[in-house]
Amino acid sequence: MSKESIASALKQATETKFLEIGSGILNKVPNIFKDQFPGKKAIIIADPNTYRVAGKEVHEALKNANLEGVEPYILDDPNLYADYIFVEQIRDYLRDKDVTPIAVGSGVINDLTKRASSELKRPYMCVATAASMDGYSSAGASITNKGAKITHACEAPQALVADIDIISKAPSLMTASGYADLYAKVVSGADWLLAAELADPNKPKKGIEPITSAWNIVQDGLAESLQDPVGAKNGDHKAIELLTEGLMLGGFAMQSMESWGAGVSRPASGSEHQFSHLWDMEHHTFKGEMAKKFGLYPNQDEQAPSHGFKVGIGTLAITAMYEVMLKTPIEQLDVEAAVEKWPSLEVQLKEIDEMFGGTDIHPFATTQTSDKYVTKEELREQLNKIKSNWSVLKDKLRKQVIPFEETKKRLSAVGAPVEPEQIGITRKRLKDSFYRAHKIRSRYTILDFAYRAGYFDQWIEELFGENGVLKG
């Protein structure tokens, strides 16, 4: 990965104007802040841990440069996570203060500050403390609001600083989580190839986007960023730097998709993320030995798995489904039979009633499923497109998808969970999650193809059957 590729990605980003990745660069924050926010004073937003590892040093540097507006705002709630209640706390605290926020932290701190800053219509800066997720540079924040985990539209940071000395010392579990989040771009890329087959440039449709330059931003350096899981686990500077660059590029790619609508995450998120979002919306937590091993908060008896760990299990599940798909003779698909069996929207909404009735997920799933519903005529056209071009598409997908066993080997090597039970998900729940995850996003993925072509039950039974790779 070259500096030129990062510079090119920055040019395509719509909101982030500056990124510096390097070792020992926290002392550069005051000058970067002055250049990016002339005439402004800063406030640090952090939690106790991120303030200790990086915030304090940045704080002192800002004070010495006469750039401190008010004392740092430290979120010290032991149950801190990306919930909208904390957005409101930050927003209300900042409302009457003429200061520019500097988020010092990783996923939670960045997303909370991002959304709060956006609601106040203020730009902000971020100092990354771990290579734990790809949301640093994305134009959106994944936040739970009234029980639903959704991507809220908001502006990405105007400036980003990632000190590899700090990031390489982050807990190895955080690095493993980030590696799994980046690895997900392999199967989300496959989903995009599948969706792009249906894209009509004359009739743009959110959820069925053609391949754009954002593809290259994410995919061109992806193999290099993922090449050394053991080095990433051990905090090797080169492996961490490549991982950090890959995660940052994912966010820039999402920014470049702004013309498709606010918060479009197609370049970095597909069906594998739907598993994570589903479990978030179900308020999934786990405890016991696995929680102690794979939880990021070892002092808590019960906790939610990290975003990356949930995505990693989703990645394995969808990789397995793609392997089944690639063995299926789709060139022989009986399109008319699939169209004949296509359930009406009323029937699909009854399925949602059965799955989610009485939960906070129900209205959200109803909206998403309604948004992506197609008529029988539209379905016929879609299935015929994929069937007629299957030989070419199959070759693209085979080149894109890394085999299940290799995926499992790499995720294990970085220290990420590779069995659903390791994050508190039973095999039955994983199996059910294929069906449930399909209902909560309007974005076209392999789950939609399987459902629309009539393969869903057949493929799930193969995955979880006697010889299936997900049977446990």
Image (cartoon, rainbow, N blue to C red):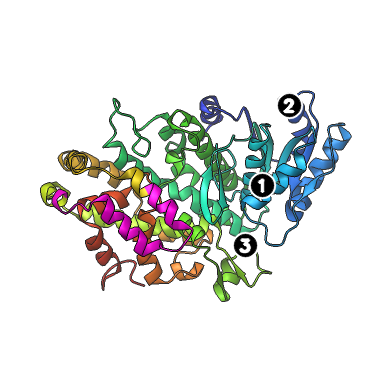
* Mark drawn on residue 296: 3
Dots 2, 1 in contact, CB < 8 A: no
**Sequence-first tag of 1 and 3:** 1
Q: Which sits earlier in the primary sequence, circle 2 or circle 3?
A: 2
Q: What secondary structure predominates along the stretch shown in magenta?
A: helix
Query: Mark 2 or mark 1, which is nearer to you?
Result: 1
Nearer to us in this view, 266 or 53: 266
Residue to which mark 2 is pinned: 37
Task: Give the amino acid type for the residue marked by disc 3 in the picture.
Answer: Leu
Where's residue 365, x and y in %? 40, 53
Select label 1 or label 3 by which is in front: 1
Check disc 1 and report the residue beneath it. 87
Between 15 and 247, the one lying in front of the other is 15
Instruction: Identify the image quadrant of residue 376.
Output: top left
Q: Is residue 404 left or right of residue 453?
A: right
Q: Which residues are magenta?
A: 339-368
Dot 3: within a 10 Å radius of its alpha carbon, few (fewer than 14), some, or many (20 or more) residues? Answer: some
Amino acid marked by disc 1: Val
Q: Amino acid at mark 2?
A: Phe
Let me know if residue 291 appears in the view: yes
Q: Secondary structure at mark 1?
A: helix
